[in-house]
Image (tube, rainbow, N blue to C red):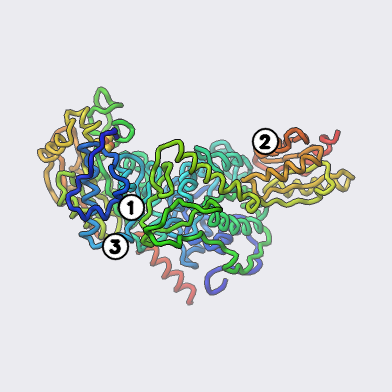
């Protein structure tokens, strides 16, 4: 996050009813992709026909984590990495709520990685929107769990030596019932995908590749948001139903986008209800 | 068991089980936890009992997640609890702080075992008393209660839920392995709804609701998710709207209120039990399992003609500062036995402020004091 301020660039004006306009201008840098992703989410809520009063948005910490502060929903800005367990309690406390976690790759895949795989494993009915900009923005552009190998960050000045997570592959293996990846250069597809994820029972994960021109971009020859958008355009290959194993992202080469997983599996709440029934049956005997 | 799944009657049960039953009677309908000795029986009992009362038990991936899930459930309007021991308590400190700043009612039970680190998992200690007070970063005030028997753990869990709902703060119940695993008679009464507190809810329409605007008692009414209030809450320093404000002024206003809402209401919160203190020249100040042994030592001293008394702390945080200050004018010495190397004794010493001497009777953990050790300390302090 740097101090450059820009007005929101969300096209449709009815989006305003969805945002806390009294909190504008937002903190995101010029050319940052997070605002676009928030816009897609807002339209997806509408598209999915959800009552906004029943939608809660939970964020962790980081640039993406600030989304909770800008949406006019019941919104919770929690601690670093902990949005998912907080969301788990909220959802089980009131299963009628639509609970969405909106956070960044560092928050969800590094410090919150354990919560992420276990939330997917238990198939709790949540939707996760994971902004992936390949680095830690809020703290100044350090290497993170998604930084491509060889990429420059403020803590990998000679190039990153660690292999990144392939998020769709990880989530598919962990048991998520819906997994997709889009970039903010694909707003229509992204909106549609988030809408699908919102109504999909079980654990849904939407990865959103999003430019961080201020930091990651600057250090990797994409110092404008537009440069990264061009990269997305050039490198993304839409392939729905692809094997998530092939979804690795390198410094160069194709970036697979599309829907990887869309399967049926009883949700955690379905299973809880079975337990309630079993207990009731036992009592009546 | 009655129709509604709540137990009534007289039972023989251990402290961990009584803890779970206290929660059920208090209206707790959500438990998130992670197995840990010697608190596991609380989780096991909750997993068995909650489905009978329409509640949800979930075993999380660790104690960090457990604490967060409890906070989330509370924001859905459900009374929620977790139970753990030392290593898990350490992991919960991060989001205990979130509970404090979001002002989230919930109960966290620590069945203390001996540390540091893995220490003695199956044996008692009272080594987390200062961690209970200061364990999460930043300035805040917390409520911590200490039971000395299975019956009292039952009673104090209900009290803990009431205090947490009343003051919108996580309440700690600092038990220990000895109380958790001892089995005794526990009487479970029918608890009438008017004896169970619920958080104050907003009485204004959503457009007018300010999540952190408090009136005289400094405790703001709390909306819950899904009711149309569309509120925002954050772990960042915030204003009455709940919006982040990164200034020293906002910090001053918020932290003062978070601390003062407990501090200024301390007379309503603090509970102690006194025996033989009126004419006492020596007072043993003890809490939890240690207070039961201290009672024997005080009786023995009385039998030997020593004017000894017992001040049993039921609320440890906030500390019974005023009462200790008052008693310091009357007594020669405070004897403070505790299963650690000196924690609550520091508070007693601070409040005694040189007016009475303060003697620590430490025990490193793994067992409990003998009455004899405490009696000796009483006698020595008279010499
Ligand atoms: S992600 Fe990067 S571009 Fe976006 S606000 Fe953070 S630092 Fe700025």
Asked if marks 3 and 1 fall on the same chain, the answer is yes
Q: Position of residue B47 (x, y in %)?
A: 49, 60
Pick out the residue farthest to the right.
Answer: B305
Pick out the residue farthest to the top.
Answer: A158
Image quadrant where one finds the C terminus of chain B: top right
Q: Which residue is mark 1?
A: A57
Image quadrant where one finds the N terminus of chain B: bottom right
Residue found at x 64% / y 53%: B268
Residue found at x 67% / y 52%: B271
Q: Which mark is residue A51?
A: 3
Residue found at x 27% / y 45%: A130
Q: Residues within 10 Å of mark 2 (few under 14, many from 20)?
A: some
> How far is the residue under mark 3 from the one under mark 1?
13 Å
> How far is the residue under mark 2 from the one under mark 1?
44 Å
Residue found at x 48% / y 43%: B254
CB contact under 8 Å: marks 2 and 1: no
Could you tell me which secondary element the residue under label 3 belongs to?
loop
Q: Chain letter of disc 3?
A: A
CB contact under 8 Å: marks 3 and 2: no
The answer to which of B68 and A21 lies nearer the viewer is A21
Q: Residues within 10 Å of mark 1 (few under 14, many from 20)?
A: many
- The number of discs equals 3
Image-quadrant location for residue A82: top left
Query: Which badge, 3 or 1, is on the more N-terminal residue?
Result: 3
Q: Which mark is residue B346?
A: 2
């Amino acid at each position: 996050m740097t101090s450059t301020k820009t007005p929101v660039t969300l096209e449709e004006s009815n989006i305003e009813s969805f945002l806390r306009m009294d909190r504008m201008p937002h903190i995101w840098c010029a050319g940052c992709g997070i605002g676009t992703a928030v816009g897609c989410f807002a339209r997806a809520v509408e598209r999915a026909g959800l009552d906004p009063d029943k939608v809660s948005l939970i964020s962790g910490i980081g640039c993406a984590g600030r989304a909770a502060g800008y949406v006019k929903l019941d919104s919770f800005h929690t601690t670093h990495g902990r949005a998912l367990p907080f969301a788990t309690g909220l959802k089980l406390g009131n299963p009628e709520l639509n609970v969405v976690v909106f956070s960044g790759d560092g928050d969800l895949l590094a410090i919150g990685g354990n919560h992420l795989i276990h939330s997917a494993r238990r198939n709790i009915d949540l939707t996760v929107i994971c902004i992936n900009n390949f680095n830690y923005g809020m703290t100044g552009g350090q290497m993170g769990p998604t930084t491509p190998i060889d990429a420059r960050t403020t803590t990998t000045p000679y190039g990153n030596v660690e292999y990144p997570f392939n998020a769709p592959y990880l989530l598919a293996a962990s048991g998520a019932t819906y997994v997709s990846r889009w970039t903010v250069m694909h707003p229509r597809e992204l909106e549609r995908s988030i809408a699908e994820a919102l109504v999909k029972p079980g654990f849904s994960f939407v990865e959103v590749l999003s430019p961080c021109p201020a930091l990651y971009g600057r250090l990797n020859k994409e110092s404008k948001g537009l440069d990264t958008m061009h990269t997305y355009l050039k490198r993304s290959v839409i392939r729905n139903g692809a094997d998530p194993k092939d979804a690795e992202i390198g410094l160069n080469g194709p970036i697979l986008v599309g829907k990887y997983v869309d399967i049926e599996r009883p949700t955690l709440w379905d299973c809880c209800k079975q337990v309630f029934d079993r207990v009731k049956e036992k009592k009546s005997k | 068991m009655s129709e509604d799944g709540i137990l009534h009657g007289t039972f023989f049960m251990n402290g961990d089980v009584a803890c779970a039953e206290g929660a059920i009677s208090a209206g707790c309908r959500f438990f998130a936890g992670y197995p840990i000795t010697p608190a596991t029986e609380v989780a096991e009992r909750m997993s068995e009992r909650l489905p009978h009362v329409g509640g949800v038990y979930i075993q999380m991936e660790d104690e960090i997640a457990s604490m967060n899930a409890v906070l989330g459930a509370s924001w859905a309007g459900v009374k929620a609890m977790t139970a753990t021991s030392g290593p898990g308590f350490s992991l919960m400190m991060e989001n205990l702080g979130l509970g404090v700043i979001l002002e989230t009612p919930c109960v966290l039970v620590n069945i203390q075992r001996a540390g540091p680190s893995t220490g003695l998992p199956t044996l008692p200690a009272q080594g987390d008393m200062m961690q209970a007070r200061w364990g999460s970063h930043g300035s805040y005030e917390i409520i911590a209660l200490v039971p000395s028997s299975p019956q009292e753990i039952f009673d104090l869990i209900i009290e803990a839920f009431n205090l947490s709902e009343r003051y919108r703060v996580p309440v700690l119940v600092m038990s220990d392995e000895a109380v958790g695993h001892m089995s005794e008679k526990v009487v479970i009464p029918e608890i009438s709804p008017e004896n169970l507190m619920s958080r104050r809810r907003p009485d204004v329409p959503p457009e007018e609701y300010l999540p952190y605007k408090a009136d005289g008692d400094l405790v703001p009414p709390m909306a819950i998710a899904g009711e149309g209030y569309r509120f925002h809450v954050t772990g960042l320093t915030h204003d009455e709207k709940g919006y982040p404000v990164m200034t020293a002024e906002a910090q001053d206003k918020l932290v003062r209120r978070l601390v003062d809402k407990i501090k200024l209401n301390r007379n309503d919160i603090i509970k102690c039990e006194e025996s033989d203190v009126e004419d006492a020249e020596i007072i043993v100040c003890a809490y939890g399992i240690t207070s039961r042994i201290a009672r024997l030592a005080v009786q023995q001293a009385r039998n030997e003609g020593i004017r000894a008394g017992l001040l049993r702390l039921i609320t440890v945080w906030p500390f019974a500062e005023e009462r200790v200050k008052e008693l310091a004018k009357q007594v020669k010495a405070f004897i403070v036995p505790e299963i650690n190397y000196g924690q609550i004794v520091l508070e007693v010493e601070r409040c005694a402020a040189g007016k009475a001497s303060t003697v620590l009777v430490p025990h490193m953990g793994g067992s409990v004091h003998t009455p004899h050790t405490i009696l000796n300390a009483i006698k020595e302090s008279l010499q």
